[in-house]
Image: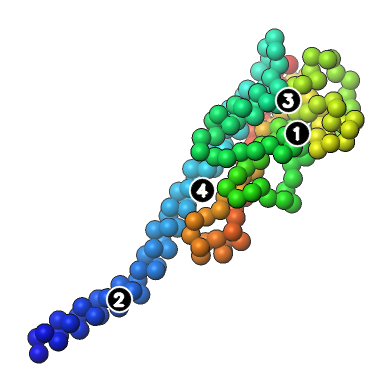
Amino acid sequence: MGSSRIDGQRSQAIVEFAIIAPILLLLIFGVVDFGRVIYVYATINQAVNEGARSAIRASALLPTNTDVENSVKQHAIDVSLANPCPNGPIVTNTTPPANQGWVYITEPDAPSAVESLAPSLENAPGGQMWANATISCSATNPAHDHAPLQVTIRYNFVPFTPLIQQVTANHIIISASATYKTEY
């Protein structure tokens, strides 16, 4: 009689664990995904600040879009970034690929007309003169005369946890931007 009672308690414990285990695993993986979201947000926030700092400095050789992108990518450790259209417009109706971000270097309120600039400013961050002439993906002019310059990252975060993936439509868009005034 004592043996069947112990077997019954073991069976009960296995059934209880089978009921609780999925909830416990969901909580554990949810905490891991939440930690990943916080890490990615902190990383891209730091990266846009460093990119904006490198974009606004005045020196003998003004920084180019490539210099700004390299600075952003250097500070975005373990975050995959691309640059399909560096000078905007910032596209919100399409999402970057899974676990990848797009970098934009724009003026927050870009003028709609082409401005006459010194040749030394044509490659400055914020746009290029040829973009307005060829109607490419850039619709901005280079930042100059202490105009504000904005560096933005839109990142498509995909959670590990399948249930969270379903709830969030398989992605969470994380966006960070920094706006500084140029020194040139």
Q: Residue at x 62, y 42 (%)?
A: 101
CA distance for labels 4 and 2: 32 Å
Q: Quadrant of residue 121?
A: top right
SS type, badge 3: loop
Badge 3 amino acid: Pro
Q: Position of residue 153 (x, y in %)?
A: 64, 39
Q: Position of residue 57 (x, y in %)?
A: 66, 18
Label 2 is placed on what type of residue?
A: Glu
Mark drawn on residue 125: 3
Q: Earlier in the sequence, mark 2 or mark 1?
A: 2
Residue 10, visible in the rendered structure: yes
Q: Secondary structure at mark 1?
A: loop
First in sequence, mark 3 or 2: give its number: 2
N-term-proximal mark, 4 vs 2 = 2
Marks 2 and 1: CB-CB under 8 Å? no
- Residue of label 2: 16
View extreme (bottom): residue: 1
- Residue in the picture at 68% in, 50% down: 95
- The residue to which callout 1 is attached is 87
Which residue is under mark 4?
37
Residues packed near mark 2 inside 10 Å, few (<14), some (14 to 19) or many (20 plus): few
Q: CA distance from mark 1 to mark 3?
A: 8 Å
**Label 4 – label 1 distance at C-alpha:** 26 Å
Give the spatial CA distance, label 3 vs label 4: 29 Å
Q: CA distance from mark 3 to mark 2?
A: 61 Å
What residue lies at 60% left-to-right and 44% top-to-bottom? 100
Q: CA distance from mark 2 to mark 1?
A: 57 Å
Q: Residues within 10 Å of mark 3 (few under 14, many from 20)?
A: many
**Depth order, front residue of 77/107:** 77
Q: Quadrant of the N terminus?
A: bottom left
Figure quadrant of residue 178:
top right
